[in-house]
């Protein structure tokens, strides 16, 4: 990359119009951005692909970036340069991000220093790229929104995807009884090897009855829900008294009976990482770093794609029959 760096140009995905995955265009003459006050320039080695990026790209998301833009928030790489006022990291540090200013599907990216965290040597760059949105979302849902307590039972719907694996590992570390669902037997195995005590196939008829049986009819205290438009009505019926459903993902509307919340005095809580305060972000980063040191935070990387196959990655994350770890772009 030295020649490219000399000219200050890089390869990056640019989106000039909202639409199908094909709008993700690889451009090779993109100017490498420069870090301003409290910003960090990162030489990207890997970038996580998250479902939210497909919603934004399609134009269906509430917040639309101005065009053209480069998608991606979760990168892992090496600090190339730092702007004025940056003290937490320095040139040469291995880092990962939870957000970027200039977009992560690129060879270089700019991030605010508060969103840049050191990556321990035990994790490689593809694993580092799988931390950001999944682990920070799982923490926000479980700790900041559901206020989980050790000894409670949590059900993770979609336990084999990026957020799901993160939620399994985190829940287990927090002392919860962890139940996970997945759509394939491989997905169920993945959940079990990442902290779930029991796994269920959500494609099976009557699987919710099996979950209730596993709780001896008492129900679950907390549900982390990735596909609310399909599951929310059933979720409310599976909760224990005082139970909480945290809404992490939804692909459309659903009809529910509000009476189900009265019967349990239960809560439906929306989760959006966008609203995390700097204090909340700091608290989460500290716990996750401890998890990396202790060894329970081990991102599972699924399919890896080179940067020029970003469109394929966007297609696959939405259409694949069963998630198995985190989809990552590599540079």
Image: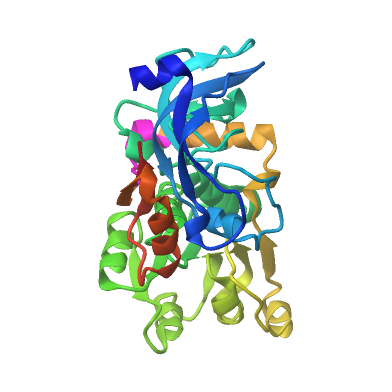
Q: Quadrant of residue 45?
A: top left
Assign the C terminus to one quadrant of the image. top left
Assign the N terminus to one quadrant of the image. top left
Residue 329 placement (x, y as % from top left): 38, 44
Residue positioned 61% across, 21% down in the render: 39
In the displayed structure, does residue 25 sit left or right of residue 84? Answer: left
Given residues 295 and 57, the one toward you in this image is 57
Q: In the rendered structure, does residue 154 fall within the stretch colored magenta?
A: no
Residue positioned 39% across, 56% down in the render: 313
In the displayed structure, does residue 215 sit left or right of residue 268? Answer: left
**In the picture shown, does residue 114 fall above or below 331?**
above
**In the picture shown, does residue 120 fall above or below 148?**
above
In the displayed structure, does residue 252 sit left or right of residue 168? Answer: right
Number of numbered discs overlaid on the protein picture: 0
Residue 322 placement (x, y as % from top left): 35, 69
Which span of residues is magenta-colored?
291-299
Residue positioned 71% across, 52% down in the render: 63
In the displayed structure, does residue 184 sit left or right of residue 179? Answer: left
Q: In the rendered structure, does residue 292 fall within the stretch colored magenta?
A: yes
Residue 260 placement (x, y as % from top left): 68, 82
- The answer to whether one can see residue 159 in this image is no
- The answer to whether one can see residue 40 in this image is yes
Q: Quadrant of residue 159?
A: bottom left
Residue positioned 53% across, 33% down in the render: 285
Query: Residue extending furthest bottom?
Result: 205
**In the picture shown, does residue 298 fall above or below 242?**
above
Residue 41 placement (x, y as % from top left): 52, 22
């Amino acid at each position: 990359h030295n020649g490219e760096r000399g000219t200050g140009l890089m390869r990056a995905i640019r989106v000039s119009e909202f639409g199908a995955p094909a709008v993700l265009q690889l451009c090779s003459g993109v100017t490498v951005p420069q870090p301003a006050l409290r910003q960090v320039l990162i030489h990207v080695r890997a970038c996580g692909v998250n479902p939210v990026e497909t919603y934004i790209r399609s134009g269906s998301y509430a917040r639309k970036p101005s065009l053209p833009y480069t998608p991606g928030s979760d990168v892992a790489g090496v600090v190339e340069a730092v702007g004025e006022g940056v003290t937490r990291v320095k040139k040469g540090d291995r880092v990962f991000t939870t957000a970027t200013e200039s977009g992560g599907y690129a060879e270089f990216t700019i991030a605010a220093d508060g969103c840049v965290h050191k990556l321990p040597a035990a994790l490689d760059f593809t694993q580092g790229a799988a931390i950001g949105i999944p682990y920070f979302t799982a923490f926000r849902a479980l700790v900041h929104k559901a206020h989980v307590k050790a000894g409670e039972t949590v059900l993770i719907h979609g336990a084999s995807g990026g957020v799901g694996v993160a939620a399994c590992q985190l829940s287990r570390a927090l002392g919860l009884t962890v139940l996970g669902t997945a759509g394939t037997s491989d997905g169920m195995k993945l959940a079990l090897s990442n902290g779930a005590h029991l796994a269920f196939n959500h494609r099976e008829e009557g699987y919710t009855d099996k979950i209730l049986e596993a709780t001896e009819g008492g129900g679950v205290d907390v549900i982390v829900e990735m596909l609310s438009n399909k599951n929310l009505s059933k979720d409310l019926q599976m909760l224990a008294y005082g139970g909480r459903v945290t809404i992490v993902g939804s692909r459309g509307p659903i009809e529910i009976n509000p009476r189900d919340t009265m019967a349990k005095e239960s809560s439906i809580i929306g989760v959006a990482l966008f609203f995390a305060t700097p204090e909340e972000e700091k608290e989460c980063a500290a716990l996750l770093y401890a998890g990396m040191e202790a060894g329970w935070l081990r991102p599972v990387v699924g399919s890896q794609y080179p940067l020029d196959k970003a469109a394929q990655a966007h297609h696959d994350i939405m259409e694949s029959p069963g998630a198995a770890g985190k989809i990552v772009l590599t540079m």
